[in-house]
Image (spheres, rainbow, N blue to C red):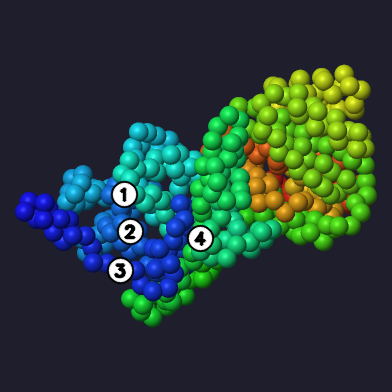
Amino acid sequence: MQLLTRLRAINDARSSWQPTPGPQADAYESPADELLYGGAAGGGKTDLVLGLAFNDHRRAVVFRRTYPELDDIVTRSQEIGDPEYYKVGAHEWRLPGGHIIRFRHLDRPGTERRYQGHAYDLIAFDELTHFDEPQYVFLISRNRSTVAGQRVRMIATTNPGGPGNDWVMRRWGAWIDPDHPNPERPGALRWYAMIDGYDVAVEGPEPIEHGGETITPRSRTFIPARLADNPYLGDDYRAALMSLPEPLRSQLLYGDWSAGMVTDAYQMIPSAWVSAAMERWRAREGHPIEGDLVMGIDVGRGGDVSVIAQRRGDTITHIERHSERDTMPIVGYAAMIYKAGAIKAVVDVIGIGAGVVDRLRELGHDVDAFNAGAGTSRRDATGQLEFADCRAAAWWNMRELLDPSFGREVALPPDQMLLEELTTPRWKPTSGGRIRVEGKDEIRKKLGRSTDAADAVIQAFWNESQVPSALIAETQAKLSTGSRWTAQTTPRWRRTR
């Protein structure tokens, strides 16, 4: 009798909520280990998370970036479930049968480590683009259950935009990146595995043997939610979204992931310039590329990858990423490219890169050692701006090569990670009036990794003349005669003579 009473209590505590037909129901029934649901505002994203937590899972945790942002989802949960079982002080539901739904926040990098040793069969992120990639990736390891037959999954809801837009777009690129080379339809599964620190697409769910370990792939999908899919929202909500300025209107009303990729005043390389260079690469694909073969080599350290960028003329033809911790395999890869006709390599000489420089020189190859922290007398195209170090000069050189007003036709591979790395750093003037690039630690915090591929590409162009000499002469003439210089490369903080 007690068992029957307990079962009735469990059943009564369960929500009567059911998904609406269409994308919400598709997401509810999706077999994916990792599901991204969303796009437009008003698509029933919060209800989906709560419905799964109440109806299908034993131990669930729902994350928002800050605690105040949990207010709406907690209020909605009390409308769906029986408030008798909500524990206000603990910010969690304790349902009959030991079922738990917790509401938590991750307001700073590293706070995800609080959940070391925890286990949840449902981990949900509400507004995923507000989180950092390392937070999401770490909590994958907490997504497990000891109960036989219990479904285990992660679900993330979000609108486009927010500080994490780029990493979310990259992780689910096959579904949401309009330029993805191998797109996938909404709701279809693909499998991914973490191999040597990289998120790698694999053929299917079969375990993979690698480096003496058995790696089990996880499935992933994206299901778009639209305002029209939610029958409970009226025209006034749509009208409110229509009144928003761009890019918020396109992001929230239409679920446009590419809207809002806007350059700010101190972005080192504008996003539009990089995108244009990638379009030029697509146009050149399959055609002969002229010019001497030069390499830029960024040697990884501290868990970073090593990258070799190959350049012919104004075109980066190939980007290779290598995860070996030993530097000698990098020497071997570079030596093979020399045999294929490379005339020179520009190699990051700091730290373990010095060993690569020395060994390549021992083999008789022409190598330029690039010391990012060294001082430089190099100036910008106007001849007016100086640089804090070679790293700043090299990044500014790349900026000027991509600047359409200078007439160069640089082409870059359509690589999402490269685009992110080239467009993340900001610059600022030092107190002495020199240009400095944002520090690597700050960039790593924003991007979740180093700018390895971007650094290799920039080094591959380091010995190139920044702009045509005629343009330099024209610029200097304008400056000497008092004409105001209005090219986009001249910072607003610097007055012209």
Asked if disc 4 and disc 1 are in contact, CB closer than 8 Å, the reply is: no
Q: Is residue 84 visible?
A: no
Question: Is the C-beta separation of discs 1 and 2 under 8 Å?
Answer: yes
Whether residue 127 sits left or right of residue 480 in the image: it is left
Amino acid type, label 3:
Gln
- Per the image, the residue denoted by label 4 is 222
What residue sits 41% from the left and 51% below the top?
A: 153
Amino acid identity at mark 4? Phe
Where 349 sits versus 64, above or below? above
Which numbered disc flags the more N-terminal residue, 3 or 4? Answer: 3
Residue beneath disc 1: 60
Q: Secondary structure at mark 4?
A: strand
> What percent of the width, then of the height, locates residue 336?
86, 33
Earlier residue among tags 4 and 2: 2
Give the secondary structure at mark 3: loop
Q: CA distance from mark 3 to mark 1?
A: 18 Å
Quick one: label 3 or label 1, which is nearer the N terminus? Answer: 3
Residue nearest the observer in this picture, 430 or 67: 67
Residue 18, numbered circle:
3
Q: Quadrant of the N terminus?
A: bottom left
